[in-house]
Amino acid sequence: MSEPMVLRFQRMALDNQSSTPDLLRTAKAIAVKLQLADVAKWIDYELDGYPEDVTLPDYRITKGKLMGLNPINGPIPMSVSNAQHEIMLRTVHIKAPLTELARAYNDPEATMTFSFPTEYSYQLQHNKPEFLRFPLIQQIGQSKMLNVVEKVRNRLLDWSLELEQQGILGENLQFSQQDKDKAPMTVNNFNFNGNINNTGLIGADNHDFAQQNILHVSAGDFGVLKNKLQALGFSADDVHDLKNLLDSEPAQDKPTRVMPKVYAWLGKAGERIIDAGLDKAAPLAIEAITKYLGG
């Protein structure tokens, strides 16, 4: 008799010779057979990378190094005097597929870089004299990359143990109806159920971007734009300043004349978005404002 599917999955999780991407593929087969759609969706995100409109698990949010890209000397460290600004600017959202991160096992010098939105980078450099006029990036090294891989692997091992405890083994690569009925219990015990954006087995970041999928900005509708921007983390005062800015330009001149001023507003307001993560909030804000202007 062949080894039950869940026990083989568990053995793979304990075997360092089995790669985590291979472990995820086996987990997906189990999740699909058990009709656990949310688990299968999370696995797809881990294998293929996270789309822009999906909230990242907490283990994929970390602190990187803030660097300037010197065209002669390469990346150079950039210092930040304000502690809150430093937290914001060093916060990295890792969306890359797990396969890319796992390559760091064989490369102690492995790094991954993340670019700031160009307009925000220019405005930040203009407002902050401590920033030289180099393109700004965030950088993480091998340990940060592999931390994501190990977090995923540990969660898969925990899930396999819970499946075994519930008597869900997958004899001959098949699961009974009773197994499928009990399977959601293995998810609930890890808070790994429902919306994958919720805190639980896969975690979540500290800011709720769920509204970005349901708030569709129309030209001239500032009420919806206001809700969208506040959902992204912009304060009511910053949104009010933006409205005054937009109202100050004649309608026939929009958006050509107003967008440079919008970028300047984003540079100032963005400094106060500590939790949201500029790599996510800034492009979404620009997209929403452009739609409001009829672009």
Image: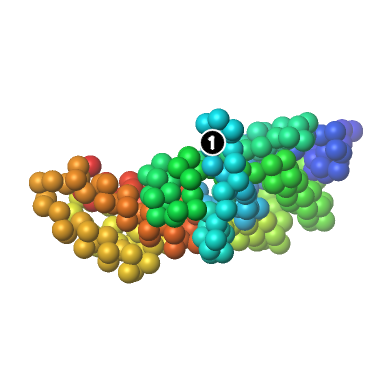
In front here: 75 or 199? Answer: 75
Query: At which x and y percent is residue 108?
Result: 77, 35
Q: The residue under label 1 is which amino acid type?
A: Asn
| Left or right: 240 as drawn, with respect to 8 | left
Q: Is residue 192 visible?
A: no
Residue at the extreme right of the image, as rendered:
1
Residue at the extreme bottom of the image, as rendered:
237
Query: The N terminus lies in which quarter of the figure?
Result: top right
Query: The C terminus lies in which quarter of the figure?
Result: top left
Determine the image quadrant of residue 181.
bottom right
Q: How many marks?
A: 1
| Left or right: 21 as drawn, with respect to 295 | right
| Left or right: 45 as drawn, with respect to 160 | left
- Residue name at image x 53 percent, y 37 percent: 69
| Left or right: 65 as drawn, with respect to 107 | left
- Image height of 74 relative to 141, above or below: above
Q: Is residue 236 visible?
A: yes
Query: At which x and y percent is residue 20?
Result: 75, 38
- Image height of 7 relative to 204, above or below: above
- Residue name at image x 71 percent, y 56 percent: 186
- Image height of 269 relative to 101, above or below: below
- At label 1, counting other C-alpha atoms closer than 10 Å, the crowd grade (few under 14, some 14-19, many 20 or more) is some
- Image height of 188 relative to 29, above or below: below
- Secondary structure beneath dot 1 equals strand
Query: At which x and y percent is residue 78?
Result: 57, 49
In front here: 220 or 239? Answer: 239
Residue wearing tag 1: 70
